[in-house]
């Protein structure tokens, strides 16, 4: 048995659509803003991962959001490109349609609140007015594309009878995907399962549309609620890489996909995701946003397949299935990571990057990354995959406005540390020579002198990438400016250089935030 969809044609009964909103809902996380080039890089990678629908942004929110959606629609192929719009927004749907003009396949996702709380205090509208807006919004969206999605914001807290009326109106006026979000992460799995079953049983035309689940993680139930929604009849899953998103985040794509795959006996559903790319996708996002994945994060955390208990280690050695319900390789982890050395050439380096899931780098970026690799190989006894990943990701920020050119420092027990710093700001070289209370303090003071700013340091954290005294240091720096938080990351075998790279990465992210107009309140 198959299902006909305007973008996907005949869909098998067991097929689930993966709708990724990392670039829209995920970017609403404090400190997670991305510039256009970073969004474009992520969109290409999401398409390569096998994501069915990429929600690229909210075009009417700002010129930057419009341009990022337009660029993604024009350049990314393979996935449906989606733009968000308010059902009753004055220019929302028109802006989304304009931004998506050059997409291979496009979708407009329009929404309005339907819960009593939201209608009374947020919209200040009567239910009948909301129904009228649902009708007109979907009609207008259909003027731009045959693929229209409608969302009932705060749907999980909406009166069931009214929710049925809203969904019926949306279907009758052109929506072919119906999304019921648990916007504030309040629902339980049993409640989400029941909502979808109710709608499919009660709403005329429900068998002609795709129902979609969008669950937030405020109570830690985002993934559980999503899987329950699938059991209730949802055929589309809205999620983000690493589970990023507003407040406590969204349901995590990698966890949902691997749950469906590992427990196929329970759910009998499949996706089009290339699971071996999940780890590289997770790490790409962490590098771009500056936010590390917690070590014990399911699927992609560095401890996800680590075993310290002697009992567990003994079982793993005898049969991996004793303590591992999936193989590390199935999500992109390598069993062996010792691969390259100082005698390795550019061709071998390029092949290694391809085997690690990296797209083909531009010649200039490849040369810069290879130069850093050779320098690292001269200083380290052994070079691991994680070492290569850190230096390539760190070098990939070629669209940043601020770059480290050189750093010299002297430090010891008798005199204050002193730093000489040279950075490039929009192509102009800036110098500073500063002393401080230790080399890191002196280095950060030097950055502040070379590039004056009002941001304050809110977090400074150092961890090693691999083992040994010659391991690369991975540094995270969090800056705070006017209530805006950003995290930056840097990696180098020299801890101070790593810290400077992280600080400069955070500054570049602050510049991106300054340039962007704050978007209006969005749907979740």
Image: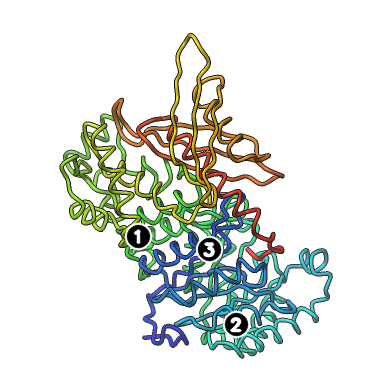
Applied colour scheme: rainbow
Quarter location, residue 273: bottom left
Give the residue pinned by disc 2: 97
Which is more N-terminal, label 3 or label 1?
A: 3
Mark-to-mark CA distance, 1 and 2: 39 Å
How packed is label 1: few (under 14 Cα within 10 Å), some, or many (20 or more)? few
Mark-to-mark CA distance, 2 and 3: 19 Å
Where in the figure is residue 13, as x and y percent of width and height?
A: 39, 79
Q: Secondary structure at mark 1?
A: loop
Tell me the tag on residue 192: none
User: Marks 1 and 2: which is nearer the front?
Assistant: 2
Where in the figure is residue 88, as x and y percent of width and height?
A: 73, 78
Tell me the tag on residue 263: 1
Give the residue pinned by disc 3: 36
Q: Residue furthest top?
A: 414
Left of 113 or right of it: where is 36? Answer: left
């Amino acid at each position: 048995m198959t299902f006909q969809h305007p973008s996907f044609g005949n869909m098998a009964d067991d097929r689930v659509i993966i709708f990724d909103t990392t670039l829209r809902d995920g970017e609403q996380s404090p400190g997670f803003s991305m510039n256009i080039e970073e969004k474009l890089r992520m969109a290409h990678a999401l398409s390569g991962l096998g994501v069915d629908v990429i929600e690229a942004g909210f075009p009417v929110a700002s010129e930057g959001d419009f341009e990022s959606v337009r660029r993604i629609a024009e350049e990314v192929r393979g996935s449906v490109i989606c733009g968000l719009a308010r059902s009753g927004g004055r220019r929302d749907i028109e802006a989304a349609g304009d931004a998506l003009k050059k997409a291979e396949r496009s979708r407009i996702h329009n929404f309005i609140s339907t819960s009593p709380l939201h209608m009374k205090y947020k919209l200040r509208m009567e239910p009948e007015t909301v129904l009228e807006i649902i009708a007109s919004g979907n009609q207008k969206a259909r003027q731009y594309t045959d693929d229209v999605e409608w969302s009932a914001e705060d749907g999980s807290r909406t009166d069931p009878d009214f929710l049925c009326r809203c969904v019926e109106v949306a279907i009758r006026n052109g929506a072919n995907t119906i999304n019921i979000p648990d916007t504030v992460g309040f629902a339980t799995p049993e409640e989400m399962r029941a909502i979808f079953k109710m709608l499919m049983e009660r709403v005329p035309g429900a068998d002609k549309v795709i129902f979609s689940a969008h669950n937030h993680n405020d109570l830690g139930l985002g993934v559980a609620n999503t899987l329950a929604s699938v059991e209730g009849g949802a055929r589309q899953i809205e999620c983000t890489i690493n589970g990023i998103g507003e407040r406590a985040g969204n349901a995590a794509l990698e966890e949902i996909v691997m749950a469906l795959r590992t427990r196929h006996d329970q759910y009998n559903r499949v996706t089009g995701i290339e699971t071996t790319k999940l780890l590289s996708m997770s790490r790409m996002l962490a590098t771009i946003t500056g936010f590390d994945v917690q070590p014990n994060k399911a699927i992609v955390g560095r401890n996800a397949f680590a075993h310290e208990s002697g009992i567990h280690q003994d079982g793993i050695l005898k049969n991996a299935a004793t303590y591992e319900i999936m193989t590390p390789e199935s999500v992109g982890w390598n069993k062996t990571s010792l691969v390259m050395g100082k005698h390795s050439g550019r061709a071998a380096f390029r092949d290694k990057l391809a085997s690690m899931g990296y797209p083909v780098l531009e010649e200039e970026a490849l040369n810069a990354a290879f130069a850093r690799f050779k320098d690292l190989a001269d200083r380290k006894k052994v070079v691991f995959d994680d070492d290569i990943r850190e230096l390539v990701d760190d070098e990939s920020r070629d669209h940043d406005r601020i770059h480290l050119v050189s750093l010299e420092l002297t430090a010891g027990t008798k005199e204050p540390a002193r730093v000489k710093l040279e950075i490039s700001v929009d192509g102009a070289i800036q110098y500073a020579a500063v002393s401080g209370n230790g080399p890191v303090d002196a280095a950060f003071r030097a950055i502040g002198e070379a590039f004056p700013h009002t941001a304050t340091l809110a977090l400074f954290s150092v961890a090693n990438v691999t083992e040994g005294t010659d391991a690369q240091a991975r540094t995270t720096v969090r800056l705070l400016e006017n209530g805006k938080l950003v995290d930056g990351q840097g990696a180098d075998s020299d801890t101070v250089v790593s810290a400077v790279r992280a600080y400069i990465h955070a500054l570049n992210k602050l510049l991106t935030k300054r340039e962007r107009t704050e978007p209006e309140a969005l749907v979740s």
